Image (cartoon, rainbow, N blue to C red):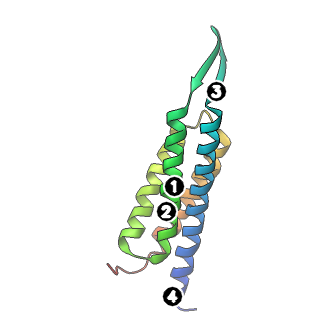
Amino acid sequence: MTDNGVRRRGLLLAGALLGGAGIFDAVAGVADLTTRRYVSLGVGGIHEHDITGWAWLHLAAGVLAALAGALVPLGRRWCVWLAVATTAVFVAVHLAFLTYHPIQTVIVVGVALAAARLILKHRLPATG
């Protein structure tokens, strides 16, 4: 297989990983929007937390990541850097939300960082 074919397959896999992580996050954001209530038990009793803003942030980050994942296989320079920037925002959102969904955060951040590594490793020569 040619070097260009290997690069395209790497970008295709990276796009699928990033898109899958984005869809997973968007679904989690919708689920958080329907729940809207988190409670914690503390010294002063039970505390209720409204996470509507975080849910909207997760939904927006998930949609943006899915869109960036769909554009990565094009191999354009702007698509690659959009995906890398999206991954950085995506990871930051999840690390801020770590206390509410630790397992989801570990899974999605791992997949997103694997996608970013593939994107940076297999990006095509600059085409515009």
Q: Position of residue 119 (x, y in %)?
A: 49, 69
Image quadrant containing the N terminus: bottom right
Mark 4 to mark 3 CA distance (whole Å): 50 Å
The amino acid type found where label 1 is placed reads Val
Sooner in the amino-acid sequence: mark 3 or mark 1 = 3
Q: Residue at x 55, y 68 (%)?
A: 14
Mark 2 to mark 3 CA distance (whole Å): 29 Å
The amino acid type found where label 2 is placed reads Leu
Sooner in the amino-acid sequence: mark 4 or mark 3 = 4
Give the secondary structure at mark 1.
helix
Instruction: Name the residue carrying label 1.
Output: 63
User: Which of the labelled discs sits on residue 38, or is there none?
Assistant: 3
Sooner in the amino-acid sequence: mark 4 or mark 1 = 4
User: Which of the labelled discs sits on residue 3, or is there none?
Assistant: 4
Determine contact: label 4, label 2, CB under 8 Å. Answer: no
The amino acid type found where label 3 is placed reads Tyr
The amino acid type found where label 4 is placed reads Asp
Determine contact: label 1, label 2, CB under 8 Å. Answer: yes
Mark 3 to mark 1 CA distance (whole Å): 24 Å
User: Which of the labelled discs sits on residue 67, or is there none?
Assistant: 2
Sooner in the amino-acid sequence: mark 4 or mark 2 = 4
Give the secondary structure at mark 2.
helix
Sooner in the amino-acid sequence: mark 2 or mark 3 = 3
Q: Position of residue 73 (x, y in %)?
A: 50, 75
Mark 4 to mark 1 CA distance (whole Å): 31 Å
Q: Nearer the viewer, residue 111 or 55?
A: 55
Determine contact: label 4, label 3, CB under 8 Å. Answer: no
